[in-house]
Amino acid sequence: MVQRDEDDKSDDACTQILGIILICISAIAMQATLLLTTPVVGGLAAMGIFLFIVALLGMIGVVMANQALIFLYLVFMSFIGFIQFCVAIACLSAFNKARRTEVLLSGWEEASNDTRQQVQSTFGCCGLDSKHVIYSRCEELKLPCCILTTHNCTGCPLCMSILDNRLQHAFQFTGGMGLLFTFLQLGGILLAWWYRRQPVLGFGHDILN
């Protein structure tokens, strides 16, 4: 019984850590372009928060030896794992170049002037594309690429290609980590289920069978 409690607490602690890491990864992805927060990456962050809360529920169930809470924990973990898997697949496959371009255009048009200036200063680019470039404003920012040219910053690269590359890597990184954590969660669920089916550990089977 003691060994079972220790294993369950370790499993819940690992789940909490996964939740925190998932939130951090989503935050990194959101900051990859400094321009937008897409619903998919935001959804992954929400899953991380929910995962952390469910892990706390599991710990409470273990401490109180409450089989109903533990069973509820397993149900929630299965639900989160499924949603997280769908979001991870969306990050890895749904956002092709055309979709990323659409997202960047929308984010640029909705962004404030301060955000646009921050993006251009951070990545050393001027304007999102040929339709959204104002060289005089880039010159005011004193970008390195403007200093190296005498043609009003016309030698500066456009931000679209730079942001698209970063956004692609952000989605691949976030989706890959989300997929990895989904399989880790699945392993934790199967391990917890196996422990709760062992008669020697002192658990009844009335709820789980």
Image (cartoon, rainbow, N blue to C red):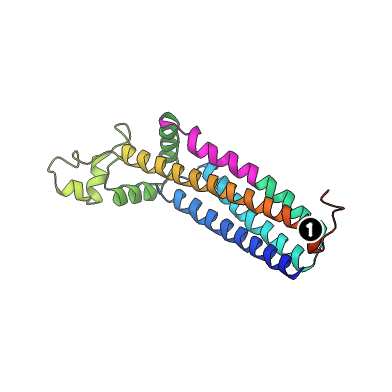
Q: Quadrant of residue 127?
A: top left
Which region is colored magenta?
A: 81-97
Q: Secondary structure at mark 1?
A: helix
93 or 126, nearer to the observer: 93
**Closer to us: 90 or 190:** 190
Residue 175: say if magenta: no
| Res 63 → quadrant | bottom right
The kind of residue on which mark 1 rests is Leu
Residue under pointer 1: 69
Number of on-image labels: 1
Dominant secondary structure of the residues highlighted in magenta in the image = helix
Task: Give the residue displayed 29% in from the left and 51% down from the top.
Answer: 121
Image position of 138 (left or right of 107): left
Q: Position of residue 15 (x, y in %)?
A: 62, 58
Q: Where 15 sits versus 37, above or below?
A: below
User: Which residue: 23% across, 50% down?
Assistant: 143
Q: Residue at x 78, y 63 (%)?
A: 201
Residue 186 position in % (x across, y down): 64, 48
Residue 142 pos. (x, y %) = 22, 51
Q: Is residue 85 left or right of residue 76?
A: left
Q: Identify the residue at image location x=27%, y=42%.
A: 126
